[in-house]
Amino acid sequence: MPRAVYVLALGVFAMVTSEFAVAGLMPQLAEGLDATVPQIGYLITAFSVAMSFGGPLLAVALLRMRQKAALMLLFAIFLVGNLLAATASGYPVMLAARVVSGVAAQAFFGISISLCAQLARPEIRGRAIAVLMNGLMLGTLLGLPLATVIGEHLGWRAAFWAVAVLTAAVALCTLAGVPDADHAEGTGSLRDELGALRDRRLWLAFVTSTLIIGATFTLFSYVNPILTELTGFSAGAVPLLLVAYGAATVVGNTVVGRLADRYALPVLATGLALNALFLAGLALLAQFRVPAVGLLLGVGLVGVTMNPAMVSRVQRIGGSRPLVNTVHNSFITLGVILSSLLGGLAIESWGLRSVLWLGAALAVAGLLSLLPDARRARRAVPGQEPDGVPDRAPGARGNNPRGADAKVVETLTIGS
């Protein structure tokens, strides 16, 4: 595994730590910015919306730049966003800071995934993406608790100063440890990038990713009240349970990364089926502590950990272009936004338990969205490329992953 991939994962860790910091600092931010807790919650929404819509626009603006130079510019923009947050004199400045940081973070994710695919050998690209995504998992496992602890003891400004220092340090590591590289594919022209987005199957893959993350975040967005009000845990026990959840995501991400290159479709199908089962089970058994914890960890194993398989599927169709990966990440972020919005509406209408049923329904919808690809893989003749789409990531050699997919997709198409 190229060491540069681990350096890129540090960048993802810094971005995710900043993204999640607000969630752990809500009371301090509300007091310090003279705002209400719901208003502080809008800072999370603003970050996510900026990622979804601003990230691809910034990625387009950087298409002509060499990828390492683009990463360094994005580090600089992200650093400015966190410095603005650390020195914010009021709520409007903090809101602007979160928008700046969100736009830079999304473009960074897209270019990092593209560069990661370029640096790793074709047969280990899925594992490389898993290493990169472990930066996200560790942001949940370590970054959020550390930011919360710093904020509680030294104030919320200190938490953002810490993220700024981390960002600067990781930028220097990237400058020294990541080799320079040109565009991952094509000429880097806007026409080439947009041309890759014309494939309807690529948009179906984007929708599947939205549903996977949406299903998972219906639980994660409301995990604190679910564990305290439905299961009966004390508020002090929730951070420990979140650490266990974060550890489960690291394990699941590692396993999926080893399978994603050859078995992307069956991994996604299995993950969605299990996620639906775990979320429905939690909806039924949330009042019992032992089953609730087991089901929570189950969601951790098969939820956001599908990222390597999601990326592998997208790159198999659209290649490793920066804009394709950035748009894909925007759809992933859209899943977070939709889950929080739809979850809030469900809770207001039917109570807290309903959000878990919503998550199970989104997972089932994600499973159904795999059917067109499953039928195509079932019809494919081994060794041929169905409908002109590459069977593997560009440049890959060796076993045909489409053939591996075809062996297990019959479970998705029985009766169809």
Image: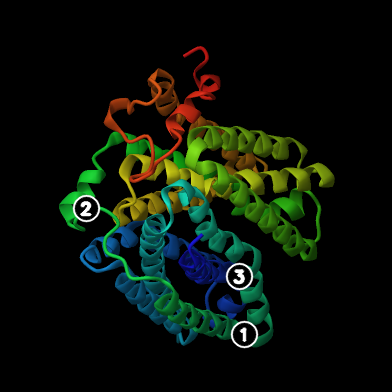
Taking the image as shown, residue 258 lies to the left or right of residue 204, namely right
* Residue type, numbered disc 1: Gly
Percent from the top left, x then y, of residue 374? 45, 25
Mark 2 or mark 3: which comes first in sequence?
Answer: 3
Mark 1 or mark 2: which comes first in sequence?
Answer: 1
Marks 1, 3: nearer the viewer:
3
Q: Do the residues labelled 2 and 3 touch (CB within 8 Å)?
A: no
Residue that mark 3 sits on: 143
Give the residue at x 46% y 87%. 87
Q: Is residue 30 shown to the viewer in this render?
A: yes
Identify whether 146 is placed above or below 241. Answer: below
Residue that mark 2 sits on: 186
Residue that mark 1 sits on: 155
Q: Are marks 1 and 3 in contact (CB under 8 Å)?
A: no
Q: Is residue 206 shown to the viewer in this render?
A: no
Percent from the top left, x then y, of residue 411? 55, 21
Q: How far apart are marks 2 and 3 (CA)?
A: 36 Å
Percent from the top left, x then y, of residue 130? 53, 54
* Residue type, numbered disc 3: Gly
Q: Could you say which is closer to the camera, residue 106 or residue 191?
A: 191
* Residue type, numbered disc 2: Gly
Marks 2, 3: nearer the viewer:
2
Taking the image as shown, residue 55 lies to the left or right of residue 233, namely left
